[in-house]
Amino acid sequence: MLIRVAQADDFDAVADVLARSYPALLAADYPAEVMAQVVPRIARPRPELLASGRYFLAVLNDQIVGAGGYSLNAPAGRDAPVGAATPGLAHIRHVASDPAHLRRGIGRAVMAAIFTAAQSEGSTRFECLSTLTAVPFYAALGFEETERVTVPIGPLGFAAVRMLRPD
């Protein structure tokens, strides 16, 4: 498996991974009506993130099987103004693994690339807004649950867990 930095032209391949991952992996933890309104919105890659040099892809046999990245700026929807950065804090963004390749270390390898790159930019703490499904994954990487939140995506909202990996 190869971990590489994403490029803007990886958009379609990343969209495919997200479209395979989220419906398959989240269905056990979210009602069908929430999935129907949320998945089409969260399964779209963020072009600015793909082009940032802070988004990584796991490639196996020339196929993208995992993805994830970080930003130094707070993602939209946080209490801080959009774009605000907190020194030393990186925000984990849009992490997913192809459901056909689970339990093979793909997500962990993507996260290792994220940690290394963000630390090289001075980040010592990491925050993520985890799906209910991914809480055990992030906990295994040293993240701690800080609060349960409802993300305003559509009229029903989307239950998530804010998690922090301290220094």
Image (cartoon, rainbow, N blue to C red):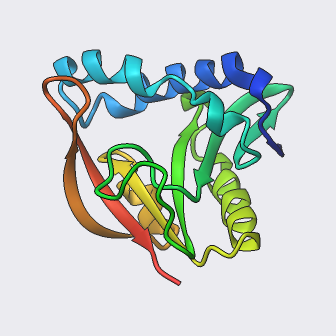
Which sits in the foreground, 140 or 43?
43
Say which quarter of the image contains residue 14.
Answer: top right
Q: Is residue 92 visible?
A: yes
Most extreme residue toward the bottom is 167
Q: Position of residue 163 (x, y in %)?
A: 36, 64
Looking at the image, which is closer to me, 53 or 146?
53
Q: Is residue 108 above or below residue 139?
A: above
Indicate the position of residue 85 as horizontal and vertical percent values. 51, 63
Pick the front one: 78 or 133: 78
Quarter of the view holding residue 49: top right
**From the viewer's perspective, is residue 3 above or below residue 25?**
below
Rendered location of residue 8, percent (x, y): 76, 27
Q: Residue at x 80, y 35 (%)?
A: 59
Q: Position of residue 98 (x, y in %)?
A: 59, 31
Q: Residue furthest left?
A: 156
Instruction: Mark yes or no: residue 104 visible.
Output: no
Name which residue lies at 47% across and 24% down: 43
